Amino acid sequence: MQSDNPFIADFVKMMNSAAGTFAGATREARDAARERFREAFGGLDFVSREEFDAVKALATKAREEVEDLKARLAALEAKSGE
């Protein structure tokens, strides 16, 4: 149901325009905040997830090798103590 009243039609147009302007301002504020965050934390030495996962895999492999070497050493010590 549409109104023939020009005042109401103009008011609706104005509200639609205001909503669009508000949405645009919200996007700009969000983008500006993200940029400030990047600038503030950009100089810190953070690692990416991929780098973290790669180092974690290396540490896991090293830990497994150490456990294997401990078992081999224990077996050799037991053999030499016979």
Image (cartoon, rainbow, N blue to C red):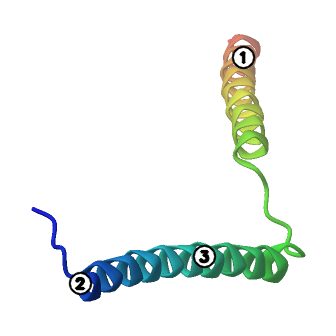
Q: Judge by depth and name the residue closer to the eye, 6 or 25.
A: 6
Q: Which of marks 2 and 1 is in front?
A: 2
Q: Name the residue under label 1.
A: 72
Q: In which quarter of the image is the N terminus?
A: bottom left
Mark 2 Cα within 10 Å, few/some/many (few <14, many 20+)?
few
Q: Name the residue under label 3.
A: 30
Q: Mark 2 points at which residue?
A: 8
From the viewer's perspective, tell me whether residue 75 is left or right of residue 26: right
User: What's the distance in space between the residues labelled 3 and 2, CA to CA?
Assistant: 33 Å
User: What kind of element bears circle 3?
Assistant: helix
Q: What is the residue that sits farthest to the left in this orientation?
A: 1
Q: Judge by depth and name the residue closer to the eye, 75 or 44.
A: 44
Q: Which of marks 1 and 3 is in front?
A: 3
User: What kind of element bears circle 2?
Assistant: helix
| Residue kind at label 3, given as amino acid type | Arg
Mark 3 Cα within 10 Å, few/some/many (few <14, many 20+)?
few
| Residue kind at label 2, given as amino acid type | Ile
User: What's the distance in space between the residues labelled 1 and 3, CA to CA?
Assistant: 58 Å
Q: Where is residue 64 in the image (x, y as percent from the top left)?
A: 67, 26
